[in-house]
Image (spheres, helix red, strand yellow):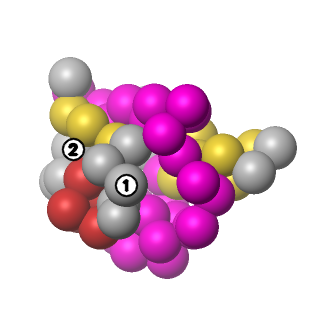
Amino acid sequence: MPAKVDKAKCTGCESCVSECPSDAIKMVDGKAVVDADACVDCGVCVDTCPVEAISME
């Protein structure tokens, strides 16, 4: 199941973008967006996010 970003919590710090091993996260209008097809469900972004805006659902 791909990662989900809570856009209300996302601060646009881009930490998840640089840590994603499958390049599945891009910034759109200052917020992280996960490409569900590219996401490999590793959870690195969840651990990386300093504001807990990403979850695995």
The residue closer to the viewer here, 49 or 22, is 49
Residue 15 in the image: state x and y as whole percent: 47, 71
Report crowding for label 2: few under 14, some 14 to 19, many 20 or more residues within 10 A (C-alpha). Answer: some
> Residue 30: x, y in percent?
75, 51
Q: Earlier in the sequence, mark 2 or mark 1?
A: 2
Q: Position of residue 48 (x, y in %)?
A: 29, 67
Q: Disc 2 residue type?
A: Asp
Question: In percent of the image, x 20 and y 62: which residue is there?
Answer: 47
In the rendered image, which quarter contains the C terminus? top left
Relative to 16, does residue 5 appear above or below in the rendering? above
**8, above or below 26, in the image:** above
Residue denoted by label 1: 51
**15 sits to left or right of 21:** right
What amino acid is labelled 1 in the image? Answer: Val
Residue 33: percent from left, percent from top? 58, 40
Q: Nearer the viewer, mark 2 or mark 1?
A: 1
Residue carrying label 2: 41
Q: Quadrant of the N terminus?
A: top left
The region drawn magenta spans: 1-24
Asked whether the viewer can see residue 47, the reply is: yes
The main secondary structure of the magenta stretch is loop
- The reply to whether the magenta stretch includes residue 50 is no
The kind of secondary structure element at disc 1 is loop
